Image (spheres, rainbow, N blue to C red):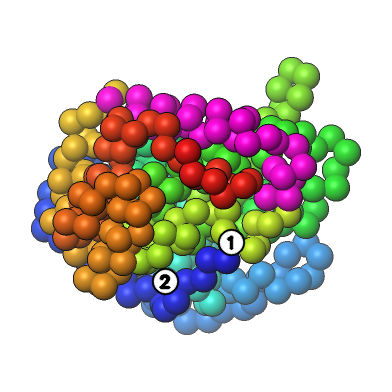
Amino acid sequence: MAIISKKKIPIKISDQLRSYLIKYDRESNLPIDYPSLLRYDNSIPLYDGSGKDTLWETVFFPQEEMNNIYLSLKKIYALMKADGDMSVMDHLFIDRVDLCVYGNTQPFRIRVVNRINDNFDYFYIKHADASRIYGLELEHLLSPNKLQYLVFRDTLIEEHIVGIPGDQFIKTHLDNPNLNEIRLAKEFVKFNERCFVRLLGDMHSNNFVIDITPDFEEVDYRIRAIDFDQQSYEGRRAIYLPQYFKQNNPIIQIGLKNMTPESVHQYQREERSLIANRMKMDRVRVEDLLNTMCIDRLSSTENVKQLGEELADFYEDREFLACASMGELVMLSLEMLIRKPDLYKDYITGDRN
């Protein structure tokens, strides 16, 4: 079982990372930042449709500031969705600003509504944390999912990732007679592999969503990470394998029932090959990111040493012992996709191949 030992300390954006963000247009001069939203003067609890407390609070701003704040939020949404073209945003309005009071980072969630058809969207405003930014960028480059985010000073703007929260999916969808267990199990194997090779930790069911896409005869599933704070931070290898979190056991049981070790190995090989191909397709940008990550301090020396030892044992490669940073461990882990493409861990039997 995987357990996060201590609360992670947010890491400031280094000069090198800031240069990378500017080079690849992730840095933007925004009209409002996170501290500006802390000027709210009232709040009420937000309840879901069944009357359950969501642990978010809807916040209200002083009347003399509200119009300017909401206009600034619309401009940010326009930057993310229409490259700053406000003319296409005339029919949109800011419906609500919510604050997550129970989380470590206490993000704001902005609800944007289309007044023509009542369709809505969200985006998030958070404290900028270097670990999370590296996680977002690695997800954008190495996974099948493209992400839009912007950074301004110490503020991070993120788009909403659509999907059913993993814990909710487990509670309400696993008994659905239309559930395609084999496709769900296959996607979990691939998600497990994506997290491990790029060292994204803490992927229990609260930290990912499941996007369901109807196919012409069946349905397909995509598991998407939504929390990137534990990118390359912990020292235990198990933290980077979603298979070891007890919250994910119901999906693991579906895999045990429907998949053979041979099919698991096939899907692992497929995903490792896909990641390697994505690295080749965006080679220069991936190299820039990893080189920046290598000189950044993202965790303690103890965690780097422990993870290096555990990865050296797993890959049977002592080069991991010489890694001095989490960035170097990620770089070497990704190199293993090329050097040892058939080396993987079978989450059904635990055997090494």
Instruction: Report the residue that reaches farthest toward the bottom.
Output: 41
Residue 162 left/right relative to 196: right
Residue type, label 2: Thr
Q: Specify whether residue 255 is painted magenta.
A: yes
Instruction: Report the residue that reaches farthest toward the right.
Output: 177
Residue 233, relative to residue 76: is it above or below?
below
Residue type, label 1: Phe
Q: Quadrant of residue 52?
A: bottom right
Question: In the image, residue 215 lies at what x, y percent?
Answer: 71, 22
Element assignment for label 1: loop
Region rendered in magenta: 251-280
Residue 102 appears in the figure: yes
Which residue is disc 2 drawn over? Answer: 105
In the image, which is nearer the foreground, mark 2 or mark 1?
Answer: 1
Q: Nearer the viewer, residue 159 or 115?
A: 159
Q: Quadrant of residue 273?
A: top left
Identified at 19% across, 64% down, the residue is 297
First along the sequence among labels 2 and 1: 2
Distance (Cα) linking label 2 and label 1: 22 Å
Identified at 48% across, 30% down, the residue is 269
Q: Quadrant of residue 278?
A: top left
Identified at 61% across, 57% down, the residue is 205
Residue 14 left/right relative to 148: left
Q: Specify whether residue 166 is painted magenta.
A: no
Residue 245 tag number:
1
Q: Nearer the viewer, residue 2 or 204?
A: 2
**Badge 1 local density, few (<14 within 10 Å), some, or many (20+)?**
some
Mark 1 and mark 2 in contact (Cβ < 8 Å)? Answer: no
Q: Nearer the viewer, residue 95 or 341?
A: 341
Question: In the image, residue 119 lies at what x, y percent?
Answer: 64, 42
Question: In the image, residue 2 lies at what x, y percent?
Answer: 53, 66
